[in-house]
Image (cartoon, rainbow, N blue to C red):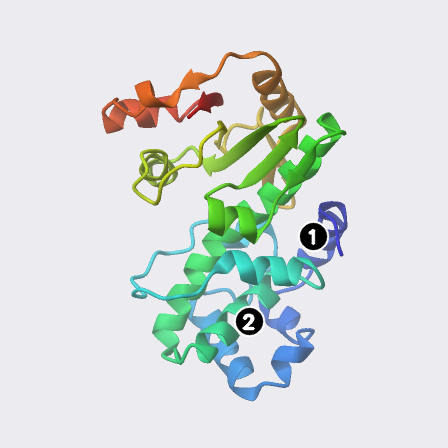
Amino acid sequence: MPTINDIRKYMDVWKRQTYRSGLEYCYLIKKDKQAYALTSDVLKMQGLEGKYMDGYSVQNIPIKNEGKVDIIFTNIFWDLAGDYITPVYYVASIVKKCLENKIDNPGQVAGIVGRGLRSLPSFLREMDLTYKLSLLFPNAKILNGPEQDVGEHTDILIKTGSREYRVWSYQDTDRGLDNTAARFCGQRGELPKGYHILCPINISDKAKVEEVNGWCFYSESYVEDIYEIISVKKPDEYQMLARLQTYAIKHYLKEVNIVYK
């Protein structure tokens, strides 16, 4: 299975290929004429056809109302990360999943692809953060995958000794904080009991970001801060935080913190 270090090497290849040229290497998609044709249409509709597959290409993807759909981008990402992944193969795999779910309207599929592409940098960032945390916690079991993300509302799970730490990775933006506040307050399902590590990232803050061809990861110094939080800081009590107004919770979520529920 490719590691994040392998994928970092792939990024040097991605940045030299456009989405259109990269589609020609998606051999399984090319065998499916309907998926191939619809992927080509979606690339044009999203303005991606002539763009190079670097991290900048998935920034500022427009938000469209594609309706409620039962497509789990986390599963699609991890299916590809275990074998062969490029941004355009991720797009084509979303298109193929749409067709399997009887969604074939190009406009709706383009909107779904846009939502999936906005998640792609986060998936890669969490994979990279998992690797960096594993270097600081060599004796811990660290899990990052769809089982934690979808089933337990946990981006990364650290198991060390008798304790479990649930790492939250999210962007320090209005949209990112709104979504995280709703999740933190239990509006997206009840939070698991235990320790929660809040890790906001502002991709404009160069001191806290490592950039690779436009893909933004947590810097090594930021990950060391996470280690210090876990090792030293006394956790804040969730029940007290849950009583705060939404604006106060969003302010709290802007800093790296540890919370116990």
Q: Quadrant of residue 10?
A: bottom right
Answer with left or right where residue 32 lies relative to residue 111. Answer: right
Q: Residue at x 37, y 23 (%)?
A: 238
Residue 11: mark in rendering: 1
Evaluate whether residue 174 shows in this view.
yes
Circle nearer the viewer, 1 or 2: 2
Query: Residue 153 at x, y = what percent?
Result: 45, 43
Residue located beneath label 2 in the image: 92
Position of residue 251 relative to residue 188, above or below, is above
Q: Quick check: 210 above or below 145?
A: above
Residue at the front extreme, as displayed: 162
Residue type at mark 2: give it.
Ala
Q: Residue at x 70, y 64 (%)?
A: 84
Tell me the quadrant of the picture where the N terminus can be found. bottom right
Dot 2 lies on which element? helix
Q: Position of residue 146 (x, y in %)?
A: 55, 53
- Quick one: SS at disc 1? helix
Residue in view at x 44 percent, y 65 percent:
71
| Depth check, front residue: 238 or 56 | 238
